[in-house]
C-alpha cells in the first residue's frame, strides 16, 4: 500500500512540476509576446507612482492582458523600483517587456502635454499643445502673447498644474539679447533674475528644455556656452583671406547676414556680398545695422527708415561708417555663423529683394539698378491690389 501511495505522490509531483513549468513558460510568452494594444497610447507616470498602480492602469486601458504578469516580469528583471516619471508613447502591439523598458528607461517625454515659449523677432508667444497618440502629432490647444495682460487660456492653466507637462524655450535666429531677457522674465514657470542684458550675439538660438523652477540666469549661461562652442568651431574651420581678424568680428558679420535674409540657401551669397564690399573698401550699406543703432535691440522699429537716419553718423550706420559696426546686431544662428566663415565665392557686391522672399544679386551697378526697378514695380503692383 505504501508503495502505491508513494508512486501516486511521485506522479502528482511530476505532474505538478510539468504544470508549473508550463505555467512559467506561458507567463513568459505573455510577458514577451505582442500585446493587445490596437492603437498607440500615451502613458503618464506620475512622480512617486508605484508599479502596481501603473500596471493596473495599463490593464484598464487594454494595453496589457494581465497586470499581475507584468508586475511579476518587472520584479523578475529588477525594474519594479526603477519607474521614471513622465509621459511615454507606447506603440500598438507593444509587449509587457517593452512597456516596462519604456517606463523605467526614462529620458525626455515622448508624448504628453507641452508648453512651448517661442521668443521671436517680432513677438514672444506661448503655445499650449497635447500629443495625439493616434496620429503621432501634437495638437495645438491654445496660444497667447507673453506680453499680454489678458487671462491665460484654460488649457494653459490645466497643463500648468499637471506635474508631467514638458516645457521648452525656443529662441529664434535673429532675436536680440534684450528680447531674450525680456521674454524670459515673462515666463512664470522660471525663477531668478538676470543681471543685465548679455552681450549682443552671445546667445545661441535653439530649443531648450526647461523645468518648473529653473533659474533664468542658468539658462542664459547655457545659451552663451553653446554660442561660444559654435563660434569657436566655425572659426577653426574658416576659409582663408576673410576680412575680419577675430571670431568677434566674424560674429558681427554673422548677425548682419542673419538679419538680411531668412532664406537658408542665400546666406553664403549674402555673406559674399559683404565680404566683397569689405575687400574692396566699400561701405556695407545695410539697413539692419542702422535700425539697431536706433532701437538698441529693444523691440522692433515698426516703420521705415527716414532719410535723416540714413544720413546721420552713428557707430551702427554702415551707410556712413567704414567697415563693421562695433557689436553684433542680433544673435545669429549656426548657419549664419558658418556662412560668415565660409562665404560663397562670387563677384556680387549688390542685392535687393526679388519679390519672392529672396534677393536678386548683381555684380555691377547697372544690373543692380535694373533689379531695383523690378522690385519697385512689384511693390507698386502690390500697393494697387
Image: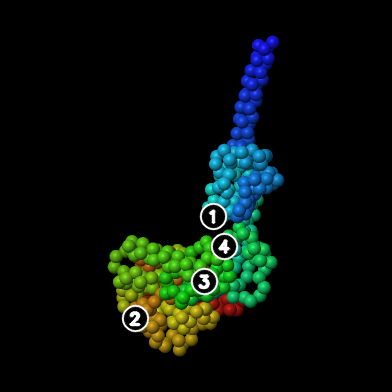
Residue with the mark numbered 3: 192
Label placed on residue 167: 4
Identity of the residue drawn at 66% across and 39% down = 68
Label placed on residue 108: 1
- Say whether residue 230 is left or right of residue 163: left
- The secondary structure type at the circle numbered 2 is loop
| Earlier residue among tags 3 and 4 | 4
C-alpha span from label 2 to label 1: 49 Å
Which of discs 3 and 4 lies nearer the camera? The answer is 3
| Residue 20 place in picture, x, y as percent | 63, 27
Label placed on residue 322: 2
Viewer-side residue, 215 vs 185: 215
- Disc 3 packing (10 Å; few <14; some 14–19; many ≥20): few
- Disc 2 packing (10 Å; few <14; some 14–19; many ≥20): some
Quick one: which residue is furthest to the right in this view?
60
* Location of residue 69 (image quadrant): top right
C-alpha span from label 3 to label 1: 24 Å
- The secondary structure type at the circle numbered 3 is loop
Identity of the residue drawn at 31% across and 78% down = 281
| Residue 72 place in picture, x, y as percent | 61, 38
Viewer-side residue, 333 vs 214: 214
* Location of residue 285 (image quadrant): bottom left
Which of discs 2 and 3 lies nearer the camera? The answer is 3
Which of discs 2 and 4 lies nearer the camera? The answer is 4
| Earlier residue among tags 1 and 4 | 1
C-alpha span from label 2 to label 4: 44 Å
| Residue 93 place in picture, x, y as percent | 63, 41
Quick one: which residue is furthest to the left in this view?
241
Labels 2 & 1 near each other (Cβ < 8 A): no
Identity of the residue drawn at 29% across and 65% down = 240
| Earlier residue among tags 3 and 1 | 1
Amino acid at each position: 500500500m505504501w508503495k502505491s501511495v508513494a508512486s501516486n505522490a511521485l506522479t502528482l509531483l511530476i505532474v505538478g512540476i510539468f504544470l508549473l513549468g508550463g505555467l512559467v513558460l506561458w507567463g513568459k510568452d505573455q510577458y514577451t509576446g505582442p500585446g493587445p494594444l490596437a492603437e498607440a497610447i500615451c502613458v503618464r507616470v506620475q512622480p512617486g507612482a508605484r508599479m502596481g498602480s501603473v500596471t493596473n492602469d495599463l490593464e484598464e486601458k487594454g494595453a496589457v492582458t494581465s497586470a499581475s504578469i507584468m508586475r511579476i516580469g518587472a520584479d523578475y528583471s529588477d525594474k519594479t523600483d526603477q519607474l521614471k516619471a513622465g509621459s511615454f508613447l507606447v506603440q500598438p502591439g507593444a509587449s509587457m517587456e517593452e512597456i516596462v523598458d519604456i517606463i523605467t528607461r526614462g529620458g525626455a517625454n515622448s508624448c504628453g502635454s507641452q508648453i512651448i515659449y517661442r521668443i521671436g523677432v517680432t513677438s514672444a508667444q506661448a503655445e499650449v499643445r497635447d500629443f495625439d497618440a493616434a496620429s503621432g502629432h501634437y495638437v495645438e490647444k491654445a496660444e497667447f502673447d507673453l506680453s499680454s495682460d489678458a487671462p491665460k487660456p484654460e488649457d494653459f492653466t490645466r497643463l500648468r498644474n499637471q506635474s508631467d507637462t514638458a516645457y521648452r524655450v525656443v529662441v529664434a535666429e535673429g532675436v536680440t539679447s534684450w528680447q531674450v531677457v525680456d521674454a524670459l522674465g515673462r515666463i512664470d514657470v522660471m525663477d531668478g533674475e538676470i543681471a543685465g542684458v548679455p552681450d549682443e550675439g552671445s546667445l545661441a538660438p535653439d530649443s531648450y528644455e526647461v523645468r518648473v523652477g529653473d533659474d533664468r540666469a542658468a539658462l542664459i549661461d547655457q545659451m552663451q556656452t553653446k554660442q561660444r562652442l559654435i563660434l569657436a568651431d566655425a572659426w577653426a574651420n574658416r576659409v582663408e583671406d576673410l576680412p575680419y581678424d577675430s571670431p568677434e568680428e566674424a560674429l558681427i558679420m554673422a548677425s548682419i547676414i542673419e538679419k538680411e535674409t531668412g532664406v537658408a540657401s542665400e546666406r553664403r551669397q549674402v555673406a559674399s556680398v559683404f565680404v566683397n564690399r569689405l575687400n574692396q573698401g566699400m561701405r556695407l550699406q545695410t539697413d539692419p545695422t542702422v535700425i539697431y543703432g536706433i532701437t538698441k535691440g529693444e523691440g522692433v522699429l515698426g516703420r521705415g527708415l527716414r532719410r535723416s537716419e540714413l544720413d546721420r553718423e552713428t557707430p551702427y550706420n554702415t551707410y556712413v561708417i567704414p567697415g563693421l559696426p562695433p557689436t553684433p546686431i542680433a544673435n545669429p544662428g549656426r548657419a549664419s555663423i558658418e556662412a560668415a566663415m565660409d562665404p560663397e565665392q562670387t563677384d556680387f557686391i549688390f542685392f535687393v529683394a526679388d519679390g519672392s522672399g529672396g534677393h536678386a544679386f548683381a555684380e555691377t551697378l547697372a544690373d543692380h539698378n535694373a533689379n531695383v526697378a523690378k522690385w519697385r514695380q512689384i511693390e507698386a503692383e502690390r500697393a494697387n491690389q
